[in-house]
Image: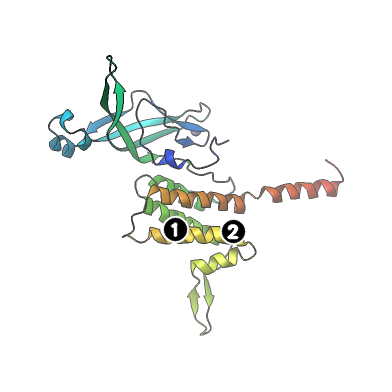
Amino acid sequence: MRPYFMIDKELLTSYFTTNQNTYWPCSNGYLVINEDTFFSKETSVSQKVHPLYESDPESVRFVYSCIFRCSNNNCNEQFASSGHGCLDWDIEEDDYGMQQQVYSPCFEPYYFYPSLKIIDIPENVPDDITNQLNKSFELFFSSPSAAINHARSALELILNHFKIPKTTINNKNKRVKINLHNRIDKLAKQNSELKELLLAIKWIGNEGSHPEKRLTKNDVIDLYEILEHVLSELFENKSKTILAKAKKINKAKGIK
Ligand SMILES: [Zn+2]
């Protein structure tokens, strides 16, 4: 069972240090850096900009690579990761009780392979939808707008899965495309809550295709939260499963 019931926004948008656990999620645990796999180097621009480390710590930049593993030994998944870093400052007391500013490296991931399981995908979600979502998770850290585009494609695949038509014949007897909004209307016609959720995904999805809009990881997380709810509603209808079980028991007048 996944240890997180809500997506941890702060966690997924934060920097990490090599001496603290990250708690990034795997489906059965969290990510831990494998010993001796973490490497970082200062970038060439950074080396040129600040000739002396101490003189301008704010301008220091790094690149890193490392291999994380899942903290759960039964899972033991390995994740290759890379990204960039900078120096973060903190106030520490020295041996004489004097406060001083101390700089230490911190890192922001751009990439994980395999991708992090950012939301729960129910087991019976078809492969094409799952693949599209994994592509989205893969791009989450490096390109929020690309991550949103893949999530929007997943929404279209959900509509296809439920056999919502993509085209219709108009009053001039011509075959025309049905837009996403109207397809959502058709899928959720008896469920206004579901419709609200699907339309919100559509609106955020539209933003993903505007290159002038600077989308952030927080925007993508908003979309993931809604999507997680939709997937659970459409593919994990527990109440229906329980009802089917109850009907079976009633028909058999007891447990067989
Ligand atoms: Zn795991």
- Quarter of image, res 36: top left
| Residue plotted at (46% across, 61% down) | 203
Image side of residue 103 versus residue 174, left or right: left
Measured from the top left, where is residue 42 in percent x and y?
Answer: 21, 33
Q: Looking at the image, do the residues carrying marks 1 and 2 touch, with CB atoms under 8 Å apart?
A: no
Q: Residue furthest top?
A: 95
Residue nearer the viewer, 104 or 249:
104
Q: Is 95 situated above or below 85?
A: above
| Type of amino acid at the residue the image marks with label 1 | Ile
Q: Is 46 situated above or below 223?
A: above
* Disc 2, SS: helix
Q: Which residue is mark 1?
A: 204
| Type of amino acid at the residue the image marks with label 2 | Leu
Label 1 to label 2: alpha-carbon separation: 16 Å
| Residue plotted at (50% across, 59% down) | 200
Residue nearer the viewer, 156 or 59:
59
Q: Which residue is mark 2?
A: 194
Image side of residue 16 versus residue 56, left or right: right
- Quarter of image, res 116: top left
Measured from the top left, where is residue 234 in percent x and y?
Answer: 60, 54
CA neighbours of label 2 inside 10 A, class few (<14), some (14 to 19), many (20+)? many
One can see residue 115 in this view = no
N-terminal-most mark, 1 or 2: 2
Q: Residue furthest bottom?
A: 172
CA neighbours of label 1 inside 10 A, class few (<14), some (14 to 19), many (20+)? many
- Quarter of image, res 85: top left
The quarter of the image holding the C terminus is top right
Measured from the top left, where is residue 206 in percent x and y?
Answer: 42, 62
One can see residue 221 in this view = yes
Measured from the top left, where is residue 154 in percent x and y?
Answer: 48, 55
